[in-house]
Amino acid sequence: MLIKALPRESALHRELHGESAEWSITDHLLAAAVDHLAVANWMFQCVNGAEDGDQPDPPKPVPRPGIDDGDEESEGEEGGASPGEASEVSPHQLARFFG
């Protein structure tokens, strides 16, 4: 019971969950907001920018802990709960949904 109550910054939590232990749900939501703003600005620039051949490169998403740049689609979802069962959303699931 005491181990469950340890803070997210604890050494045990970091050992068990790696880099993702340092990111809270708020951090993931903020990274998703930054990514969406960058994409919106990029799309605005593509539509209102110079000629067809002069389009800028798409923005790169904010790096998130535990997620490789090219492996986002190949990773399976964690903790599948049945539809009637309430479950906590993990930071990884939240990052995949918004990012």
Image (cartoon, rainbow, N blue to C red):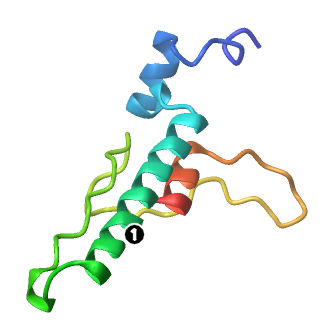
Examine the rendered structure and indicate whether residue 84 appears above or below residue 14: below
Examine the rendered structure and indicate whether residue 1 appears above or below residue 83: above
- Across and down, in percent, residue 78 comes to 58, 54
Near-viewer residue (62 or 51):
51
- Location of the N terminus by quadrant is top right
Please tell me whether mark 1 sits on a helix, a strand or a loop.
loop
Residue wearing tag 1 = 73
Q: Residues within 10 Å of mark 1 (few under 14, many from 20)?
A: few
Furthest toward the left, the residue is: 53
Does 28 sit left or right of 74 as displayed?
right
Near-viewer residue (72 or 99):
99
- Across and down, in percent, residue 7 comes to 61, 13
Picture quadrant where residue 26 is located: top right
Residue occupying image coordinates x 15% and y 81%: 50
Furthest toward the bottom, the residue is: 52
Q: Give the tally of numbered discs.
A: 1
Does 51 sit left or right of 95 as displayed?
left
Picture quadrant where residue 18 is located: top left
Near-viewer residue (88 or 97):
97
Identify residue type, mark 1.
Answer: Glu
Residue occupying image coordinates x 52% and y 11%: 10
Does 43 sit left or right of 16 as displayed?
left
- Location of the C terminus by quadrant is bottom left
Residue occupying image coordinates x 61% and y 45%: 90
Picture quadrant where residue 25 is located: top right
Examine the rendered structure and indicate whether residue 18 appears above or below residue 55: above
Residue occupying image coordinates x 78% and y 49%: 87
Examine the rendered structure and indicate whether residue 48 appears above or below residue 99: below
